[in-house]
Image (tube, rainbow, N blue to C red):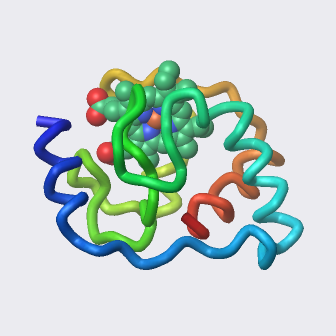
């Protein structure tokens, strides 16, 4: 199931990610949060799977791998409470907001 989703996403050209040199302070902070909490399971620059699906263009596509829309609410739920095989992440709101900003640059 997951492999199928990666396959489909891999066939379509994705919109480019924002150049890190153009990051706002919040996005740069979010990149650091991502490195700490998410990078060991998700590649940010491809849709290739690591432990979880690659998150390139996550918020620019209509649906995430599960089929849910990539809204702030849904992302917050996924991050805070986990999703399927993904464990919940203990994260403060001070880290969550920059992380959401960063995810939108992917
Ligand atoms: C221990 C590994 C692990 C960590 C850490 C992790 N994830 Fe995941 N993530 C997964 C797996 C596995 C899935 C696929 C879950 C499923 O559909 O069963 C997933 C799925 C997702 C999805 C897709 C949800 C959907 O509805 O399709 C998003 C978005 C996501 N993760 C974001 C994050 C973010 C952001 C972080 C950091 C706060 C993070 N993940 C940390 C393993 C992880």
Residue 59: x and y in percent read: 45, 66
Above or below residue 67? Residue 82 is above
- Residue shown at the point (77%, 37%) measured from the top left: 92
Q: Where is residue 27 in the image (x, y as percent from the top left)?
A: 76, 64
Disc tally is 0
Q: Which of 34 and 63 is in front in this view?
A: 34
Is 70 displayed left or right of 44 in the figure?
Answer: left
Q: Is residue 14 above or below residue 84?
A: below
Q: Residue at x 80, y 73 (%)?
A: 21
Q: Which residue is drawn at 32% across and 62% down?
A: 69
**Residue plotted at (33% across, 70% down):** 61
Q: Which of 20 and 98 is in front in this view?
A: 20
Left or right: where 12 falls relative to 75: left
Q: Is residue 81 visible?
A: no
Q: Where is residue 47 in the image (x, y as percent from the top left)?
A: 36, 52
In the figure, residue 98 lies in which quadrant? bottom right
Answer yes or no: is residue 33 visible: yes
Residue 86, above or below 42: above
Q: Quadrant of ligand 1?
A: top left
User: Left of 9 or right of it: where is 8?
Assistant: left
Picture coordinates of residue 72 (x, y %)?
52, 60
Location of residue 26 (image quadrant): bottom right
State which quarter of the image contains the N terminus: top left
Q: If the image is split into quadrants, where does the C terminus sit?
A: bottom right
- Horizontal placement of 10 versus 85: left or right? left
């Amino acid at each position: 199931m997951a492999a199928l989703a990666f396959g489909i996403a891999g066939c379509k050209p994705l919109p480019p990610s924002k150049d890190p040199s153009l990051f706002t302070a919040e996005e740069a902070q979010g990149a650091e949060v991502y490195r700490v909490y998410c990078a060991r399971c998700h590649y940010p620059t491809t849709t290739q799977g690591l432990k979880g699906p690659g998150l390139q263009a996550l918020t620019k596509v209509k649906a995430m791998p599960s089929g849910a829309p990539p809204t702030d609410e849904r992302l917050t739920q996924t991050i805070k409470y986990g999703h399927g095989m993904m464990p919940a992440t203990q994260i403060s709101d001070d880290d969550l907001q920059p992380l959401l900003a960063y995810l939108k640059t992917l």
